[in-house]
Amino acid sequence: SSVFENDIDILESADFDCSCSVDPPGLFCVGLDEMPGIGGIIDLQAPHSEFLLPAEVALFEPTNAEIFHAGSGARQIFLNTKLKDEETAKLKEFRQYLVEKKVVENGDVLPRYFESAALRIVHTSKGKLDKAVDLVKASQKERVRRLPIAETDVLDDLKGGFMYWHGRDKQCRPLLIIRLERIGAMAKDKERAVKAVLYSLEYALRYVLVPGRVENWVVLIDLENVLSVINPLSIGGMVGVASAIATALEKVYCGRMVWVKIINMPSNMLARAINGVIPAEKKDKVGFPTDVKKEIAPFFEPNQLEERYGGSAANTKPGDTYPYRFFPQCRGKASTDKGEEEQQQSGLCRTYSEWKETEDLSLHESTTLAFHEGALWDESSEIAKVRWLANAKAASLTSESAQAISKLAGTTVEPCQTVERFLELTNPEAVRGAHDNRAKTEIDWGSAEDPDATDGKTERSAAPTGV
């Protein structure tokens, strides 16, 4: 179709401005109120995966069962989407409570470092506002004070393979793998471990997740051979490191983890120690599969998982886990082979054969920190609403969100369902350049097909010889 052809032409012709995906260090050398809610990693030298942000992820349209957990009903998608009335009411109450407790001076303007996460914080605290304030303070203490983190500061630990991203599940959510046997010197250095964890999670927020579409991750903790590198008598110290990791996953980055599977448990002693650091209200997210390949593999396409976990991707070794590995077709070949009408409804907008033409063009080069930060459509404050409404109208939105913002803004806002539309919103210079290149190509080809025809154009003459 012409829609598909346009997408491919745009991608092939675009001269991407890679500076979009690079954050200046000064962005984090600001006051607390202006500290970005995501990012915080700087001076990246290692290349990103060529499949870091393919169109099937950037244009993913979550179903209601993915916006709200199919089992618990808990919200999983918070940004760039319409909120429920009761959620807006709770946010208003939270703003007032923050002023009362002197966490903020003005309830209409929340600090940037937790502004977009405000509802996520309220949900995680089960509506208990004192607990919500504790989460805000945890973010300030454990995250903000450590930023920014340069790649070189944690590179050895990233390459060691203790914690790494590897592929996505069928809902486009990235998989975080934690291999405790590779923890190395971090076992005795909690601060070093925390920095490696923060870097990994900030990387996902900045480059891997997409607000309003893909906002969560899944976690696999592999304890294989852990007792060969950790003395059972030092398990107490390891629990401290494990607790710090748990704090990062469920307090500093609250509401992001859909599930965690802990595999290859070596002993009942370690099982009890791990169970001891899992909060009671989080135990429903934690599983202990006995048949790893049978219980984990169904969540993923084979190429997204390492062979050891039931997939077809090569098993990673220390030294090759960073840069992080991502792969195409996380939703499967069938999802990219849908008919044109179904693809437009789902946001894929390309067939598999057409996608193969451009699969190495990740869209992350056109996305900024602000794009990945997204916005919480909080209507509990008119002042806050004005701040996000204008930007929301120019954001990459799902069909449902575009309808909601059109009604709210009183003007038609088009959903983002094609690569061309995506680039128009995130990197308009690339689109203009692609259109210019395509027009030039069409003129050149038109002239080449019939060199004697002028059709109102200036006839080309041969270049003089000997020049």
Image: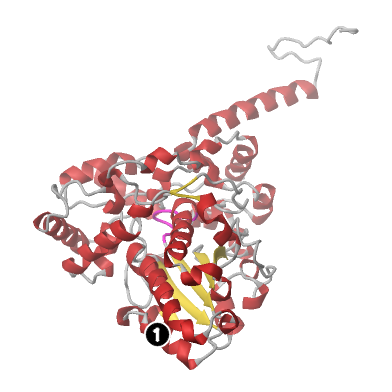
Quarter where residue 101 is shown: bottom left
> Where is residue 63 shown, x and y percent of the image?
42, 64
From what the image shows, is residue 329 above or below residue 80?
below
Q: Is residue 210 magenta?
A: yes
Amino acid at the residue labelled 1? Asn
| Secondary structure of residue under mark 1 | helix
Q: Quadrant of the N terminus?
A: top right
Q: Residue at x 70, y 68 (%)?
A: 314
Q: Residue at x 63, y 42 (%)?
A: 8
Q: Nearest the camera: 111 or 355? A: 111
Q: Residue at x 60, y 58 (%)?
A: 322
Magenta extent: 208-215
From what the image shows, is residue 380 above or below residue 460?
below
Q: Is residue 149 magenta?
A: no
Horizontal side, residue 113 vs residue 1: left or right: left
Quarter where residue 194 is shown: bottom left
User: What residue sits right under mark 1 in the picture?
Assistant: 275
Taking the view exactly as shown, the residue that stands out farthest to the left is 100
Chief secondary structure of the magenta span? loop
Mark 1 is surrounded, within 10 Å at the Cα level, by few (under 14), some (14 to 19) or many (20 or more) other residues, namely few
Taking the view exactly as shown, the residue that stands out farthest to the right is 466
